Image: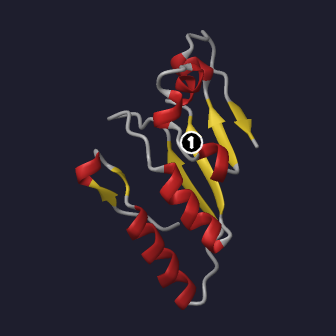
Amino acid sequence: LIKIPCNRQTYQTMDPEALENSIQIEIEKGNRPFFVSAVAGSSILGTFDDFRAIGKICRKYNLWFHVDATWGGFLLFSSQGKHALFDGTEDYVDSVSFDPSKGLGVPQQCSMLLV
């Protein structure tokens, strides 16, 4: 597990440059990174990572790219927010987790993993 620094100027989103640097360092150590998880709607600030920038890095290094959209996934159903907030997901993301109980008012715990 490698913690990637956040960019404080973009409301705590993952720093794509720091991600790529961390991947390169691990490869130089002889390790083989295989998975990156980004966030679509963090629990505290509701921030969305830059999926397009992160996705390009994942594609470059052949890494599985997952988006944790358990909190913000319901915004995929919004015609206004979908394109701006989820830019890059259709082109680069391999899997998404989604929790309808958090944003769609489903009364019971309900989660989905979309691959």
Location of residue 27 (image quadrant): bottom right
> Does residue 95 sit above or below 4 in this rendering?
above
- Decide if residue 33 is on the left or right side of residue 48: right
Nearest the viewer among 78 and 68 is: 78
> Does residue 115 sit above or below 19 in this rendering?
above
Q: Which residue type carries mark 1?
A: Asp
Location of residue 61 (image quadrant): bottom right
Q: Quadrant of the C terminus?
A: top right
**Residue appearing at x 53%, y 42% in the figure:** 87
> Does residue 96 sit above or below 76 in this rendering?
below
Query: How is the rendered protein coloured?
Result: secondary structure
**Residue appearing at x 43%, y 77% in the figure:** 21
Q: Which residue is mark 1?
A: 68
| Residue 100 x/y as whole percent | 61, 20
Label 1 element class: strand
Residue extending furthest toward the left: 9
| Residue 58 x/y as whole percent | 60, 65
| Residue 41 x/y as whole percent | 45, 35
> Does residue 109 sit above or below 41 in this rendering?
above
- Decide if residue 13 is on the left or right side of residue 81: left
| Residue 80 x/y as whole percent | 48, 22
Pointer 1 local density, CA inside 10 Å: few below 14, some 14–19, many at least 20: many
Q: How many marks?
A: 1
**Residue appearing at x 59%, y 20% in the figure:** 77
Nearest the viewer among 61 and 108 is: 61
